[in-house]
Amino acid sequence: MKPQSMIFTIYGEYVRHFGGEIWVGSLTRLLGQFGMSEQAVRVAISRIASQGWLKARKVGNRSYYSLTPRGKKRMNEASARIYKQSPGRWDGKWCIIHYNIPEKQRAKRDQLRKELSWMGFGMLANSVWISPNDLADRVKEIAESYDASEYIEVFRSEHLGVSTDKQLVEKCWNLDEINKAYEEFISRYQPQYERLKEQVKNEEDISDAECFVEKTKLVHEYRKFLFIDPSLPEELLPDFWTGREADRLFRHYYELLHPGAVRFFLSVFKSAPE
């Protein structure tokens, strides 16, 4: 677990629900629960701020950090995918992106690819990416933010063959690999969940600090699926899909850990004075 990545988890899971701003001293203490030094945390915060995700505010001799509008948008998108609701029936249409960004703007092209991958697009061919989810408006926003609108075209259309929709999915995403990642998540966290459930049943004492550490690790690990799972609708998933079981395990384990985790966070959390 790297400080920079963990800071995003702390903001997404806690800070944004309690005013969105936190004293850097509180942040270093929270991350100290994972063995991270104050210096490492401060360096990571500075780096994230320079990337445009966080902004600083001085009150007296204390620094408080909050998400920028860009950071808030990314956190909201991530939260919607992590705590996803059951989707409605797929309309059968694909969102298709084609771009032709000049070689001299390679950095812009590489950044666009990262954004498309993060949103769940799969590469069908060179410079052609697809998703069964309607992400056209979000792609347009990203294109504008990178000043690349003139190089990008967005389509919403039906797939008429020759392959089936499921075969098309197999061309763009390695579902076997994603299934394996979910299986590893289940193998790791199922025993921990069962053990905690037994402790709760036996009314054993579980510290709030322990709940905070375990819940934060759980969310941090599950958040990694944002980068590999394209959030396909049920109609396009294989018959054997461990993502459903992993999602149930995540939710149940999360619910057990959540109350104590929030209590510990609030015992450390310091927001800026009015």
Image (cartoon, rainbow, N blue to C red):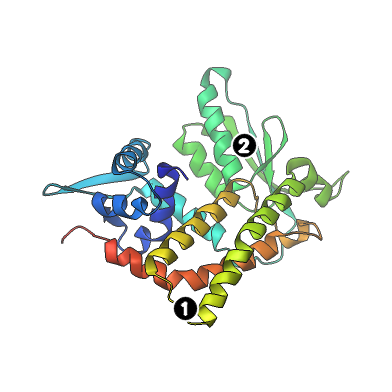
Three-letter residue code for mark 1: Glu
Residue drawn at the location 26% of the way across and 49% of the way down: 24
Instruction: Look at the picture and state if 79 lies above or below 47.
Output: below
Q: In this rendering, would 266 be left or right of 170?
A: left
Q: Which residue is mark 1?
A: 204
Provide the secondary structure element on which disc 1 rests.
loop
**Residue pushed farthest top?**
104
Taking depth in this image into account, of 57 and 124 the one nearest to the observer is 57
Q: Is residue 248 above or below residue 200?
A: above
Considering only vertical position in the picture, is 238 above or below 211? above
Q: Nearer the viewer, residue 270 or 157?
A: 270
| Side (left or right) of 166 relative to 123 | right
Circle 2 Cα neighbour tier, 10 Å, few/some/many (<14 / 14–19 / ≥20): some
The image shows residue 85, relative to residue 128, as above or below, that is below
Q: Residue 33, located in which quarter of the rendered image?
A: bottom left
Per the rendering, the mark at residue 10 is none
Give x and y (percent) for residue 232.
Answer: 69, 55
Q: Which amino acid, by three-letter code, is at mark 2?
A: Glu
Residue in view at x 67 percent, y 50 percent: 181
- Residue farthest along the left direction in this orientation: 60
Which residue bears the numbered disc 2? 153
Which residue extends farthest bottom?
202
Who's the residue at 62% across and 57% down the image?
A: 188
- Mark whose residue sits in front, 1 or 2: 1
Residue 248 image-quadrant placement: bottom right
Residue found at the far right of this picture: 162
